[in-house]
């Protein structure tokens, strides 16, 4: 129970890594606000948490919309009176080159992935300051090791790493820690969409596994447990860190084959 009574907001918690993280946080005693644009997905996460004996509520949220994020803050305080942890995890991925990406797709990807981190941080910071809380942002190994056919996505993840470090500097004196996580391939929605966009989706999935030193892609809960660590007192002297959870994707020693 490393997070007993810690109120935690997780965006994009209606599926994938966000949902697995929500379950891990609840297991450690956190009260979880499941924020997602997908209402049904968010409700399912809340059901799973409650079935396991945890405490959670769902708030339909579009992280790209300032009014929707303001409402998320309001609903969080209505439900639990305070907030200790913000985990900005929601993202979309346009699997295209810059030339093929439409202006609308580009703007939406920037608004959700990077804008969402900005808006959630901006509107939750005054409340996190009161509790000495912390922020975790979801970046990716694609923030520094880029791959073909997802240029805008890579750009947002690189920017999130820089934004994390900038916020850590701005808010460290206030006792607010800000870190981000850089996963390798994880068996969840955005990796699936990337595989589907390749000419041979099954082959792409197999090849992706072999890009990691551990010769497999990761499981969502393997990222969720690192998020729990970053939110806990065990990480009390960590801020401005980009924590790599990539099964050796970035080691430079990954076997090809
Ligand atoms: N899966 C991977 O291989 C991988 C690797 C590195 C980083 N990541 C990052 O992990 C995070 C989660 O990825 P995932 O694979 O679990 O994806 P996913 O598609 O399973 O989950 C993303 C969730 O975000 C929600 N969402 C989308 N737009 C939203 C918006 N505007 N407002 C609120 N919610 C919104 C979706 O409804 C969905 O529930 C993302 O930030 C992604 O970039 C994933």
Image (cartoon, rainbow, N blue to C red):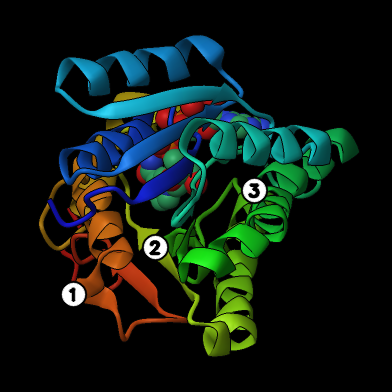
Q: CA distance from mark 3 to mark 1?
A: 30 Å
Write down the quadrant of residue 111 in the picture: top right
Disc ID at residue 234: none
What is the secondary structure assignment of the residue under circle 3? Answer: helix
Residue identified by numbered label 3: 113
Mark 1 and mark 2 lie on one chain; the one further toward the N terminus is 2
CB at disc 2 and ligand 1 closer than 8 Å: yes
Q: CA distance from mark 2 to mark 3?
A: 14 Å
Mark 3 and 1 residues: CB-CB less than 8 Å, in contact? no
Q: Earlier in the sequence, mark 3 or mark 1?
A: 3
Name of the residue lying farthest toward the right: 103
Mark 2 residue element: strand
Front disc: 3 or 1? 3
Could you say where residue 160 lies in the image, as x and y percent from the top left?
59, 65
Which label was assigned to residue 182? 2
Q: Which residue is mark 1?
A: 253
Kindly tell me whether residue 100 is visible in this rendering.
Answer: no
* Label 1 CB less than 8 angstroms from ligand 1: no
Asked whether mark 3 lies closer than 8 Å to ligand 1, one says yes
80 or 1: nearer the viewer: 80
Q: Say whether disc 2 or disc 3 marks the residue closer to the N-terminus.
A: 3
Nearest the eye: 170 or 213? 170
């Amino acid at each position: 129970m490393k997070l007993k009574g810690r109120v935690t907001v997780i965006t994009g918690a209606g599926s994938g890594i966000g949902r697995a993280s929500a379950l891990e946080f609840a297991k450690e005693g956190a009260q979880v606000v499941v924020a997602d644009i997908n209402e049904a997905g968010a409700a399912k996460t809340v059901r799973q948490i409650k079935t396991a004996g945890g405490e959670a509520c769902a708030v339909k949220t579009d992280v790209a919309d300032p009014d929707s994020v303001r409402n998320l803050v309001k609903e969080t305080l209505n439900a639990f009176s305070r907030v200790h942890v913000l985990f900005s995890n929601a993202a979309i991925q346009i699997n295209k080159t810059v030339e093929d990406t439409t202006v609308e797709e580009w703007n939406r990807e920037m608004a959700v992935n990077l804008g969402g981190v900005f808006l959630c941080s901006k509107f939750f910071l005054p409340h996190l300051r009161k509790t000495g809380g912390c922020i975790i942002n979801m970046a990716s190994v694609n923030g520094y090791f880029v791959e073909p056919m997802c240029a805008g996505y890579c750009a947002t993840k690189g920017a999130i790493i820089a934004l994390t470090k900038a916020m850590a500097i701005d808010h460290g004196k206030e006792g607010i820690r800000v870190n981000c996580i850089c996963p390798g391939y994880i068996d969840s929605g955005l990796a699936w969409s990337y595989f589907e966009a390749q000419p041979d989706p099954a082959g792409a999935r197999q090849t992706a596994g072999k890009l990691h030193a551990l010769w497999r892609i990761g499981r969502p809960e393997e990222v969720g447990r690192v998020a729990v660590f970053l939110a806990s007192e065990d990480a009390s002297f960590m801020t401005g860190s980009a924590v790599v959870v990539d099964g050796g994707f970035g080691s430079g020693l990954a076997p090809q084959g």
